Image (cartoon, rainbow, N blue to C red):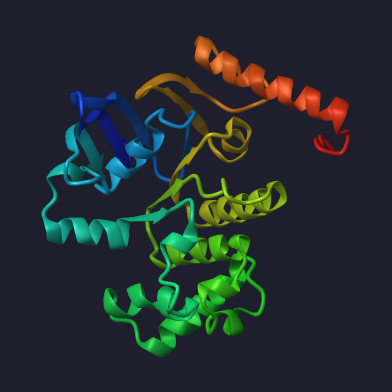
Amino acid sequence: MAALLQVEDLRVSFDSAAGRREVLHGVSFGLESGDALGIVGESGSGKSVSLRSIIRLLPKRAEVSGSVCFDGQEVLSMSSRQLRQYRTGDVAMMFQDPRAHINPVRTIGSFLTELLVLERGVSAKDAESRAVRILGEVGVSSAARRMRQRPSELSGGLLQRVMIAAALLAQPRIILADEISTALDVTTQEEVMAILDEERRQRGLAMVFVTHDLDLAAAVCDRLLVMKDGNVVESLVPGAAMTANDPYTIALMEARSWFESTATQEFPLAVDHG
């Protein structure tokens, strides 16, 4: 059975002062329906560029080659009309900073219902009812009241839950999550990712989750790709026996172990393994 999403030999380059510079070097991976893929690496590794290539959300100056195939259709050659349908119906994108992607003068309700009303032809009343219901499902208390609030009135954790609700309202087949937990404290990170993982599994959605946090990706993903300098250096299956062969991946895992050991010794409450 063909993969829901198949990326083959993806290459992306940009103009720079020194000439055209390639930042992705032949990245390939597949994603089946219902599966979660984590892409892990440090800043500049190419993980976010890989994710944005899936939805063709790169600057116009970017030069892209290779293949991004969704359900048998080539994304890189989609017409404007096809791309709009793809972006509003098949995939949903979640970003690191929700405040940068929600108009600060609009209410949460207008943000959530816009797609349903304008793209799906749902009545305003029905769209509002759906939005209130799904806000409750993702852990937003007093959902009807939140619909009347503006982004500045909500915490970062609540806004990220709003973004999860917006993604689910679109009824996509794939969720693309780009560093969505980075700006949150550790406790809120875990809560938000647990909600997203549970809702994704219940709906049978596929997910590509980009993060620098190896442990977090391993907790919510079925498979991990480790990236460095625009290359996929290793593919891992999370679990108690997760092992690495590439020196870069081994260094990431050793750095994690060193940090946890140091935190336990110096700050006994900082790491909870219970």
At x 65% / y 17%, what residue is drawn? 254
The image shows residue 128, relative to residue 96, as above or below, that is below
Quadrant of the image for the C terminus?
top right
On the image, which quarter does residue 221 sit in?
A: top right
The image shows residue 257, relative to residue 55, as above or below, that is above
At x 54% / y 51%, what residue is drawn? 201
- Residue 72, given in percent of the width and then of the height, sits at 21, 42
The image shows residue 210, relative to residue 183, as above or below, that is above
Q: Nearer the viewer, residue 160 or 266?
A: 266
- Residue 184, given in percent of the width and then of the height, sits at 62, 51
- Residue 271, given in percent of the width and then of the height, sits at 80, 35
Horizontally, is 130 left or right of 79 in the view? right
Direction front: furthest residue:
17
Q: Nearer the viewer, residue 188 or 36?
A: 188
The image shows residue 71, relative to residue 130, as above or below, that is above
Horizontally, is 205 left or right of 188 in the view? left
- Residue 88, given in percent of the width and then of the height, sits at 30, 62
At x 59% / y 28%, what residue is drawn? 238
Q: Nearer the viewer, residue 120 or 212?
A: 212
At x 37% / y 31%, what residue is drawn? 46
Quadrant of the image for the N terminus?
top left
Q: Is residue 74 visible?
A: no
On the image, which quarter does residue 144 sit in?
A: bottom right
Q: Is residue 204 visible?
A: yes
- In the rendered picture of this protein, how many numbered marks are placed on residues? 0
On the image, which quarter does residue 68 sit in?
A: top left
